[in-house]
Image (spheres, rainbow, N blue to C red):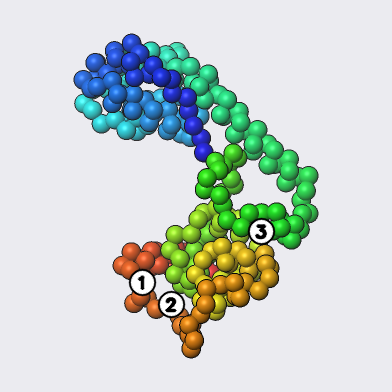
């Protein structure tokens, strides 16, 4: 997760007070707009510019009547570089993060180039069963193929009723296993009556007889051959319809 430095004097700094006064708002409100702008720029303008009025309004989430650009320029939050406008001291505040991002990408590229023949078994053995939400992600993950992601989400929804699986889980499945293996594991989880992604992950990793460790299945229980959409909430039915439509758009 990316972050930016916010100094403790931002809310009472003369630059902040000057700009807030010019825009007719409280300094704490203006500081919030600036934090929004800086956070937006990490992805949208990683070099800190060039910026136009429309960029500043979008990044700062500002919809006031006064133009933002001249106020920020006058207060010293922007620099004028031969008629183009850039965030002041951007390299000082965001440069370290941007360098870390590039270094992480380079390490990932080197690792893939050095070990192109790593087996699926080794990757599965050392990969986490589920992403740890308490630990920040220190590297930039690669984008998962959208068509593959849609197919997996659709299978989870139709077979297990899971509407919003964790993206990190889907990404790891897609990187480690084939679509046929994922589909088979989801099918086994459905047959066992267990509707959890970590159970599917366990099946993919071959972790023993997971059915014995799953919650007890009521006597006489028989899984339905198809998803009973009548049991879904309106929101789940809408999500399922969206997945089906998108899956049809990317092919089967």
| Residue underneath mark 2 | 227
Residue 160's spot in the image, x, y percent?
48, 71
Residue 249's spot in the image, x, y percent?
46, 64
Do the residues bearing badges 2 and 3 touch, measured as CB atoms within 8 Å? no
Q: Please report the residue visible at 52 percent of the width from the left and 77 percent of the height from the top.
A: 216
Q: Earlier in the sequence, mark 1 or mark 3?
A: 3
Q: Is mark 1 on a helix, strand or loop?
A: loop
State the CA–CA distance, disc 1 to disc 3: 31 Å
Residue 172's spot in the image, x, y percent?
61, 55
Q: Is mark 3 on a helix, strand or loop?
A: helix
Q: Mark 2, residues whose alpha carbon is within 10 Å: few (<14), some, or many (≥20)? A: some
Front residue of 191/42: it is 191
State the CA–CA distance, disc 2 to disc 3: 27 Å
Which label sits on residue 103?
none
Q: Which of marks 2 and 3 is nearer the N terminus?
A: 3
Which label sits on residue 232?
1
- Residue 94 visible in image: yes
Q: Please report the residue visible at 38 percent of the width from the left and 13 percent of the height from the top.
A: 76
- Residue 55 visible in image: no
Q: In this view, does 171 lie to the left or right of 48?
A: right
Question: Which-is-in-front pick, marks 1 and 3?
Answer: 1
| Residue underneath mark 3 | 176
């Amino acid at each position: 997760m990316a972050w930016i430095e916010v100094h403790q004097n931002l809310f009472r700094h003369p630059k902040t007070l000057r700009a807030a006064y010019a825009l007719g708002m409280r300094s704490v409100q203006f500081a919030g707009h600036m934090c929004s702008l800086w956070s937006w720029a990490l992805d949208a303008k990683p070099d800190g510019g060039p910026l136009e009025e429309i960029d500043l309004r979008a990044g700062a989430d500002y919809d006031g009547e006064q133009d933002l650009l001249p106020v920020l320029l006058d207060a010293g939050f922007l620099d004028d570089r031969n008629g183009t406008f850039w965030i002041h001291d951007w390299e000082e505040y965001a440069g370290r993060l941007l360098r870390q991002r590039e270094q992480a990408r380079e390490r990932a590229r080197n690792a893939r180039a050095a070990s192109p023949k790593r087996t699926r078994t080794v990757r599965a053995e050392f990969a986490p069963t589920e992403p740890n939400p308490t630990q920040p992600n220190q590297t930039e993950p690669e984008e998962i193929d959208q068509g593959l992601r849609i197919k997996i989400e659709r299978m989870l929804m139709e077979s297990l009723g899971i509407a919003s699986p964790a993206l990190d889980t889907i990404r790891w499945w897609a990187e480690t296993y084939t679509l046929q293996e994922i589909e088979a594991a989801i099918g086994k989880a459905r047959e066992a009556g267990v509707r959890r992604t970590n159970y599917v992950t366990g099946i993919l990793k071959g972790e023993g007889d997971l059915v014995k460790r799953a919650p007890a299945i009521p006597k006489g229980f028989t899984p339905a051959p198809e998803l009973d959409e009548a049991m879904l909430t309106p929101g789940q039915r809408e999500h399922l319809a969206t997945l089906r439509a998108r899956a049809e758009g990317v092919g089967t």
